[in-house]
Image (cartoon, rainbow, N blue to C red):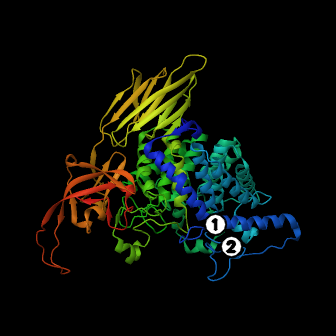
Amino acid sequence: MVKNIAKPINLRKVHIDDPFWKSEMELVRNEVIPYQWKAINDEVEGAEPSYAMRNFKVAGKITARRKELGSAYKEVIWPTDVFRPVPEEGKELEDKFYGFLFQDTDFSKWIEAVGYSLTQHPDPELERTADEAIDIVCAAQQENGYLDTYYIINDMSKVFTNLKDHHELYCLGHLTEGAVAYYEATGKDKLLNAARKFADYVYSRFGKEEGKINGFPGHEISEMALVRLYEVTGDSKYLELSKYFIDERGQKPYYFDKEHPDEAKKHGDKEWYHYYQAHKPVREQDEAVGHAVRAVYLYSGMADVARLTGDEELYAACERLWDSAVNKKMYITGGIGSTNIGEAFTYNYDLPNDLAYTESCASVGLVFFARRMLQMNVDSKYSNVMERALYNTVLAGMALDGKSFFYVNPLEVRPEACYRDARKNHVKPVRQKWFPCACCPPNIARLLSSVAAYAYTESDDTLFMHLYVGGTVEKEYENATVLWKIESDVLDSGRLRIVCKDVKEKAGAGKETVAVRIPDWCEAYELNAGGFAHELKKGYEYITGEFKKGDVIEISFAKKVRIMEASSKVFEDHGKVAVTYGPFVYCIEEKDNGKDLHMVSITTDASKARFEKALIEGNEITKILLPGKREKEKAESLYSVYKEPEYEDVTLELIPYYTWANRGEGEMRVWINR
């Protein structure tokens, strides 16, 4: 039976002081959020303009004129078949929409990160900037609640006429996520009310009733966002709308065929629907297909609806899709979506390293999906993946100084190939300042700012610890409120200490439980439960008792270098190994090991590993040193009669994957010849 077991911890009940994660969150607060604000206001020199805030200002002027003049207002119509209107070179900007048609979401994700940041670090100046931005955004909203600048500026008569491609419901989703985060952080509801009005308008327009639109989003996220709006407001119509979008997806006759009849004739085999996860009803789907970001956003919404409605069939589909994505189509770094063609999943075990797409947003979405599955079934198979994606691909998406970003996260790079091979143009050997389609940087920022909501969830009687993020957590149990102090040195020594700092008793006696994940990278662990009862279930140690101030739980996880191999079905990795240590995947870079990394091989004897502390961009990291060999170059002729290769002994230096490309351009490999 599907149960709503746990919910994310209220971020205002958590204070993070973990050295690693505090540093990441401060980087977002001090560097990324101000940088993104400049980016969405087109103030970053050398970066592609966003036009996001400019579009809201233009839309606001149009909205004001419509209100002032009423029926006398004369509409200015711009084309609505252009996916990315750009200014004409050499001409002044007109009062029209510029940028990708989903550019509104640049603001929405920025305000979401701001909200999360304010829960940990109140900042009156940042809050003032956010309030002013919210005023600009809300001024663009139509009287009926509609709020998407592409159509407000271009042609309101075309609203909801291209659900397949035009992202209006996607924009609703991100606006809602940002509005909820800002409301929960500050208590200010102006943006929340705007999101509600937009959602109410969508609710009034969609459904099976006569005269309503019987469609669903081409790009998913509104499904999970509407659930969040339901949970913060208690208004059931938002849950109902989310469920409606999920239920309609994949139903025949295909809605997009009605929208695009000519395109439908051209794609008579319906394969194009896989891209949108709309090839069959969601409860019948059993393979992760199509655009990877859209997929995990959909699966997150499905999990939310299954959790809140007790839908067994929907939950079973989530389990199947999780298994497909994670056990057959996921990179060792937690990246998903192996091809740049459609930014998509391909077939099982197709995981090329040099052509990998593995969009940063897709791993962010995988973290979303994992947390939602944990809310129904506290099982370390979800949190292990959540940790892997977070510590590797998500963190790799942002430079250590917070000023440049990866959209694509390959596992093997030769810079020359990135520049000269058109098949690899999507792979960049260094991070970029910004992107015209800038979904990844703000997605990373909003996740890192809210990491506590993934580290901890709670039920009435249990605090669940999925990630080892140090700080204090105030947990309200049925009979007591406990202030827990988490002292985490897991990334270094492997030790975790959980201290009961304070207990406020309520009427009646009761017991409290802390459930701590035992990670999959740990072959053994020692638990000192302080004399309290404990039980291992689904990869979590449940420690239960009547805790008093000063009680301590201690866990020591055995950390060893692990030499990993891929399934024999992953032909790209045959004869190769990867190195992991704790939650981190490691790689070799040209900076430490010279060029032609395809010529080196590494020992498979992990006992020979040595450690060395090093600094990259002022960040202390742990290097792993392992013996290896480098094959000597042979004759320069293109082909020659085979001769046994000669080798020289070398010591290979490996760094955490998330830190690669922070010391300039060069070759990189995760999978190394064994």
Q: Is residue 416 at all visible to an observer of this figure? A: yes
**Residue 279 visible in rendering:** no
On residue 166, which mark appears?
Answer: 1
Kindly indicate the quadrant of the structure image that contains residue 267. bottom right
Using residue 614 as the reference point, say whether residue 2 is left or right of it.
Answer: right
Vertical arrangement, residue 208 with respect to residue 583, above or below: below
In front of the other: 325 or 224: 224
Residue 466 screen position, x and y as percent: 45, 39
- Residue 590 position in % (x across, y down): 29, 65
Mark 1 secondary-structure assignment: loop
Label 1 near label 2: C-beta < 8 Å? Answer: yes
Callout 1 amino acid? His
Looking at the image, which residue sits at the far bottom? 90
Look at mark 2 in the image and give the residue it sits on: 80
Taking the spot 65% from the left edge, 42% from the top edge, the residue there is 231
In this picture, residue 433 sits left or right of residue 610: right
CA gap between label 2 and label 1 equals 9 Å
What is the crowding at mark 2: few (fewer than 14 residues within 10 Å), some, or many (at least 20)?
A: many
Quick one: 634 or 332, which is closer to the camera?
634
Q: Is residue 34 left or right of residue 189?
A: left
- Give the label on residue 91, or none: none
Query: Quick one: SS at disc 2?
Result: loop
Residue 507 image offset from top left, x and y in percent? 61, 17
Q: Earlier in the sequence, mark 2 or mark 1?
A: 2
Q: Is residue 84 above or below residue 588?
A: below
Looking at the rendered image, the quarter that the C terminus falls into is: bottom left
Dot 2 amino acid type: Thr
